[in-house]
Amino acid sequence: MSERDEIISSNVVTMHMGPQHPSTHGVLHLVLDLDGEKIVRAVPDIGYLHRGTEKIAENLLYHQFVPYTDRLDYMAAMSNNLAYVQAVEKLMDMEIPERAKYIRVISAELSRIAAHLLAVGAWALDLGAMSILLYAMREREIILDIFEMLCGSRMTLSYLRVGGARYDFTPQCKDATLKFLDILPDRLEEYETILTGNRVWIKRNKGVGVISADDAIALGLTGPALRASGVRWDIRKDEPYLVYDRFEFDVPTGANGDCFDRYAVRMEDIRQSARIIRQAVNELPDGPFAVDDPHVVPPPKPDVYKNMESLVHHFKYVSHGFKVPKGEVYSSIESPKGELGVYIVSDGGERPYRLKIRAPSFMNLQTINHLATGRYLSDVIAIISSLDPVFGECDK
Amino acid sequence: MNDKESVLIKKIKDTFGDDVIDTTVFRGEVTHLVKISSLTSILNFVKTDPSVRMNCLVDVVGVDYMGEAKRFEVVYHLYSIQKKHRLRIKVRVGEGETVPSVAYIWAGADWPEREIFDMYGIVFDGHPNLKRIYMAEDWEGHPLRKDYPLRGFKDQLNPFGVDKETE
C-alpha cells in the first residue's frame, strides 16, 4: 500500500501539539493520534529544554550547584534549593540550627503557595477564565516581594544554602508574611467563587482524566495529583523532614482522581500551607540561621569588603569548596509538584561524583497517555494543566 | 537493628542468600547490591511480600564508574506507601551487558529506563519502547558517561566542543 492509500484507509490522524503551544506550559511536544476528536494515543516527546544539569553538577563544587537548582522548577525555586541542600547535609550528617529549619519551612511553603497559585491561574487561563490568572498573579506578586525582601531575588532565589540559609529572616519579612496570610483566605474565597461552582469549569474538569489509585502509584505519580486519586501520602507527614512534625496541618485528598479533584486538592493545599506558615512564623526561635562551620558557610558579604580574614575566608570558600564524605544518599521532599528527590554519590571530594534529580514533573508526565486516551482533544488541555508540569524540571 | 532494618535486611538476605552480594547501611538508608540474574525476582519479591511491600518505584538511576571492572551501576529506589520505608537495590552492569526491564512490574519504570539508555547506553531487555528520551534520536554518544566531555564534541553546531581525534 502506498503512503497515500494508507492515510486514506486509516481513520486515525496524527496531530502534533507543541512544542510551541500556549497551553502546553512550556515546551511539551505531544504526538496525538486522533480518531475524529477522540484521543487514541498520546505520546509526550520531551527534551526540548534539556540542559544537562546533572552533567554540569558533576563538574561543580557542592555550593556552586545551588543556583542551578533554581532553574529546575523555576516556579518554586525554594523547594529545589531545599531538596538539594538537604541531600548534601544528609551526606555530611550535618544538623542545622533550629531557626534555619523554621526559615526553611516558611520559605518552602511560601513557594508552594506561589507555585499552586500559578498552576491554578494558568489552568483557568487555558480553559478560558482569564481573570483567575490575573488574580493569582496578584497574590503571587506579594510572595515574590517577600522573597525579594528575604534575599534580593524574586524568581531565582538561591536562598537556602548548605548549612542553613544565606540571610536572616528579618522582622520586616515576618510582618509581610503575616500580612499576606491575613489577606490570603479572602482571595482564595474569590477564586473559588469564580471557579468551584462554575458550570464551565465543572463540565471541563469533572470526570476528565481519571486515574485510579493503583494505576497512579504504578506509574509513579506523586504529589497533589496522586492525592487527588485518594492516596494519603505526603512526605511532610509520612517522613517528616525539618520540623514539619511540630505543625498541625491536614493532607487533603480527592475521591475521583479526576482533574477537578486535582484542582480541589491544590486549593486546599494552599490553605494548609498558609496554616503551616502561620505556625512557623509565630514559633520562629531566635539564634543563628546557619551552622557555625567556616568550611561550609561563607562570611557575611559586607565583611568581605572590610575585613582581611573574611576576604581570605570568602576566597577559600569560593575557590575550594568543601569536602563531603564518601557515600551515597537519597533525600526527598514534598515539592509543589510531588516527590522531589536528590540522589548524590560522593567519592569523598569537593564535587558530586553523580547527582540525580528525581523530578516529579518527569514522572507525572508519564501518566498522560493513561489520562488522555479515550477523551476528547480539548480535554488534553485540562489534563496537562492538572498535572502542572514544569519543563525546567522535567527536562533537566 | 530495629524492626524496619530487620525486615529490609534480614528478610531479603535470608530469602535470597548468595544473590545479595553486599548490604550496606549508610545514614539510615539500606542498600542491597544484587546479582543481575536475580534482579527481577528480588524486585518482584519486595513488591509483593506483605511485610516489605515496595509498591512505589521512586526512581531508576544510572551511575558510571569508569575504570572499574563492571563499569555501570543501575540503582532502583523503592518506597512503600503503606509501610513508609525506603530501600535501594543496585546491580553492576558491564559494558555491553543488558539489564532486564522492570517496566512490567512498575509501569512507571518506562521513562527512567529510557533516560538511562539515553544517558549511558545501557540496554534494558524487554522494555516496551526503548529509545532516547532527552537527546535527539540521531544523537551520537551518551552524555552522562564519564568519558563524554562536558562541552560535548566539536561539530558544525558546537564550535566550543572537544575535538574527537584528540580526546
Image (tube, grey):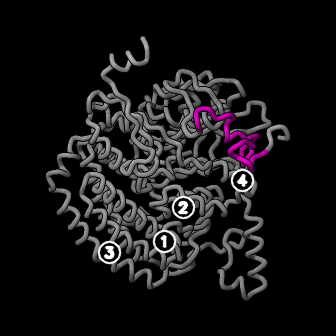
- The answer to whether A374 is drawn above or below residue A104 in the figure is above
The image shows residue B167 at horizontal and vertical percentages of 83, 40
- Who's the residue at 49% across and 59% down the image? A74
Quarter of the picture containing the N terminus of chain B is top right
Q: In terms of sequence position, does the residue under pointer 4 or pointer 1 come before the other?
A: 4
Q: Is residue A229 above or below residue B127?
A: below
Disc 2 to disc 3, C-alpha distance: 25 Å
In whole angstroms, how far apart are the C-alphas of marks 1 and 3?
19 Å
In the image shown, does A364 or A310 lie closer to the viewer?
A: A364
Query: Which mark lies nearer to you, 4 or 1?
Result: 1
Q: CA distance from mark 3 to mark 4?
A: 41 Å
Percent x, y for residue A180?
34, 76
Q: Nearer the viewer, mark 2 or mark 3?
A: 2
Q: Amino acid at mark 1?
A: Arg
Which contiguous range is marked in magenta? B136-162
| Residues at discs 2 and 3 both on one chain | yes
